[in-house]
Image (spheres, rainbow, N blue to C red):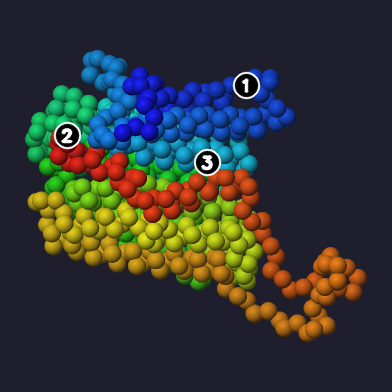
């Protein structure tokens, strides 16, 4: 069933447009603006260009989803297959199925919301032209990663996002941005070098880099030893990007230093590229190798869940001088641990849970980083002790709508039933209870128990954050005598400092949610509720595709 019947050629064009348009938009952003489009402020003109391009890409992605055949989500659709480098049998092979379509939509939506937010709140840094161009190159590389079906093209797209994110952190970031940017690029580049060796090994041993053909072959053309080496090499590169404990240490520094939109895109989109690679490449192409490493992957995943939660609890305690952005970054280590645990089960239930948790994490953590960025702009700091101790009534009393939305996002992140974060974690734990044939049930049930304990730790630190930031730590106020209280005139409050009137002891107000912030944040909150109340929207897409993937290309 398609919502609107769109011809195959138009679907092909739409997918190609989604991948290429941001790249062309990046080039156009660096060119001088036409005289009629400059307006009063050339900087605003290029920011408006970014909103326009990302908006057009989002519309095209929605059109792809509307024209997608929802009755056959396991079938590759909107496919383009053109020879590019005949000597290596490298092809420009594009296509989408029920696994990649939600990730395309998430990427297009988050990038558009970041462009819209930046139009009103551009981070301090060099030229706005360069900023817009880098965001668009980042979008093109991410969308291409989820759309390409050739291993070498996947690697190129995977690498394409590193340079833009490096410069976004290094040039538009906060304190320690240079060190954080270098740590990010070194970790990810070293992981990518190892990943390339694994990709080349698969291509040379199987005779093709075509991901569809390799998935259909389901590892039958590769010996067990080749599969083990390939999974080890490719898995290391993907694990760095995910990030998996103990390869995660670049992430908190990168998030803490990155500008708000950089953190949103890093958490909401870039981390998904690693887990997507596990599902799209390793599970179907090297199943025997994955089966060998699955128990170890699950072990690292659950250590990451507990480690990330304990790190967040340490940052959240009073007197720790914890940075709220850093805390949210460590929470991502735990959440991505659930995704890796689901993949390691090698079952439809676990993998579907992993894919659901991917999308939920993108929506919820993207919203959290938007909110933390707004709080930092208002207070001038993201230090938890300052946010909690210096304000008395804190957000609920100073900016109630902002406080309520932060509490909503935190509760969604801890996995409250009825919101998006619940289903991914639950399905992942169910998958671990009954892993694929050949995997140790006692081991995976132990991992399930540890993961379930991790959900309790997640609830603990998120509720502490809400209590401290939204409710604050009430400082003792001196009692005011009736004569000291500010009187109210019959026709309304007197202005502060009026003759004979002392200022009342009230909590200073902050700017609450602005119109542009509401426009950027509301879609994420609404989708978090929709995915939580109606999970079949997403699972109906992913489940048939996952079943086919795990069955070796057979529906």
Q: Position of residue 222 (x, y in %)?
A: 11, 33
Q: Tell me which numbered mark, 3 or 1, is placed earlier along the sequence.
A: 1
Which quarter of the rendered picture does the C terminus lie within?
Answer: top left
Q: Disc 1 designates what residue?
A: 32
Q: Residue at x 19, y 51 (%)?
A: 345
Q: Residues within 10 Å of mark 2 (few under 14, many from 20)?
A: many
Residue 486, quarter of picture: bottom right
**Quarter of the figure with residue 126:** top right
Which residue is pictured at 23% across the width and 15% down the height? Answer: 87
Neighbour tally class for label 1: few under 14, some 14-19, many 20 plus, Cα within 10 Å? few
Residue 55 in picture, x, y percent from top left:
52, 33
Q: Earlier in the sequence, mark 3 or mark 2?
A: 3
Q: Label 3, label 1: how many angstroms apart (C-alpha)?
A: 25 Å
Task: Provide residue 311's location: percent of width, then percent of height.
Answer: 39, 63
Q: CA distance from mark 3 to mark 2?
A: 36 Å
Tag 2 secondary structure: loop
Q: Which mark is residue 553?
A: 2
- Disc number at residue 79? none
Viewed as shown, does residue 489 lie left or right of 205? right
Q: Quadrant of residue 282?
A: top left
Quadrant containing the N terminus is top left
Label 3 residue SS: helix
Q: Are marks 3 and 1 in contact (CB under 8 Å)?
A: no
* Residue position for label 3: 113
Q: Is residue 348 left or right of residue 457?
A: left
Q: Is residue 311 above or below residue 531?
A: below
Q: Label 3: how many residues lie within 10 Å, few (<14), some (14-19) or many (20+)?
A: many
Q: Nearer the viewer, residue 327 or 395?
A: 395
Most extreme residue toward the right, as rendered? 499
3D distance between C-alphas at marks 1 and 2: 49 Å
């Amino acid at each position: 069933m398609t919502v609107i019947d769109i011809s195959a050629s138009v679907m092909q064009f739409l997918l190609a447009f989604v991948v290429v348009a941001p790249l062309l938009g990046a080039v156009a952003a660096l060119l001088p603006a036409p005289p009629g489009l400059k307006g009063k402020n050339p900087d605003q003109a290029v920011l408006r260009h970014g909103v326009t391009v990302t908006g057009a890409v989002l519309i095209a992605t929605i059109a792809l989803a509307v024209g997608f055949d929802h009755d056959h989500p396991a079938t590759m659709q909107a496919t383009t297959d053109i020879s590019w480098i005949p000597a290596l049998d490298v092809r420009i092979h594009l296509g989408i199925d029920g696994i990649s379509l939600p990730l395309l939509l998430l990427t297009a939506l988050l990038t558009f919301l970041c462009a819209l937010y930046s139009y009103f709140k551009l981070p301090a840094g060099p030229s706005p032209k360069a900023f817009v161009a880098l965001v668009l190159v980042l979008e093109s590389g991410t969308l291409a990663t989820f759309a390409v079906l050739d291993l070498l093209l996947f690697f190129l797209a995977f690498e394409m996002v590193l340079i833009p994110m490096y410069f976004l952190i290094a040039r538009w970031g906060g304190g320690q941005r240079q060190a954080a940017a270098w740590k990010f690029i070194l970790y990810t580049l070293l992981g990518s070098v190892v990943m390339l060796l694994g990709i080349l090994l698969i291509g040379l041993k199987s005779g093709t880099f075509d991901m569809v053909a390799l998935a259909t072959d389901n590892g039958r053309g590769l010996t067990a030893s080749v599969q083990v080496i390939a999974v080890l090499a490719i898995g290391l590169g993907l694990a760095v990007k995910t990030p998996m404990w103990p390869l995660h240490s670049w992430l908190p520094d990168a998030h803490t230093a990155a500008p708000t939109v950089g953190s949103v895109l890093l958490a909401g989109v870039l981390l998904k590229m690693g887990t997507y690679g596990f599902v799209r490449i390793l599970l179907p192409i090297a199943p025997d190798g994955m089966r060998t490493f699955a128990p170890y992957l699950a072990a690292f995943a659950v250590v990451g869940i507990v480690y990330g939660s304990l790190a967040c609890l340490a940052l959240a305690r009073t007197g720790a001088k914890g940075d709220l952005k850093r805390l949210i970054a460590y929470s991502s280590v735990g959440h991505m641990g659930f995704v890796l645990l689901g993949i390691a089960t090698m079952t439809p239930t676990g993998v579907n849970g992993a894919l659901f948790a991917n999308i939920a994490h993108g929506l919820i953590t993207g919203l959290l980083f938007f909110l933390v960025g707004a709080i930092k702009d208002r207070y001038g700091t993201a230090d938890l002790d300052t946010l909690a101790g210096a304000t008395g009534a804190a957000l609920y009393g100073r900016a109630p709508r902002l406080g309520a939305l932060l509490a909503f996002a935190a509760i969604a992140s801890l996995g409250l039933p009825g919101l998006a974060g619940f289903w991914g974690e639950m399905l992942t734990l169910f998958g671990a209870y009954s892993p694929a044939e050949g995997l140790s049930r006692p081991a995976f049930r132990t991992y399930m128990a540890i993961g379930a304990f991790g959900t309790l730790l997640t609830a603990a630190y998120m509720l502490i954050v809400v209590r401290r930031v939204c409710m604050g730590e009430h400082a003792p106020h001196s009692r005011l005598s009736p004569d000291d209280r500010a009187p109210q005139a019959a026709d309304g409050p007197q202005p502060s400092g009026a003759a004979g009137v002392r200022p009342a002891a009230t909590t200073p107000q902050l700017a609450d949610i602005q119109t542009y912030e509401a426009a950027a944040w509301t879609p994420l909150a609404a989708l978090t509720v929709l995915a939580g109340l109606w999970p079949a929207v997403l699972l109906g897409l992913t489940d048939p595709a996952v079943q086919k993937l795990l069955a070796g290309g057979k529906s």
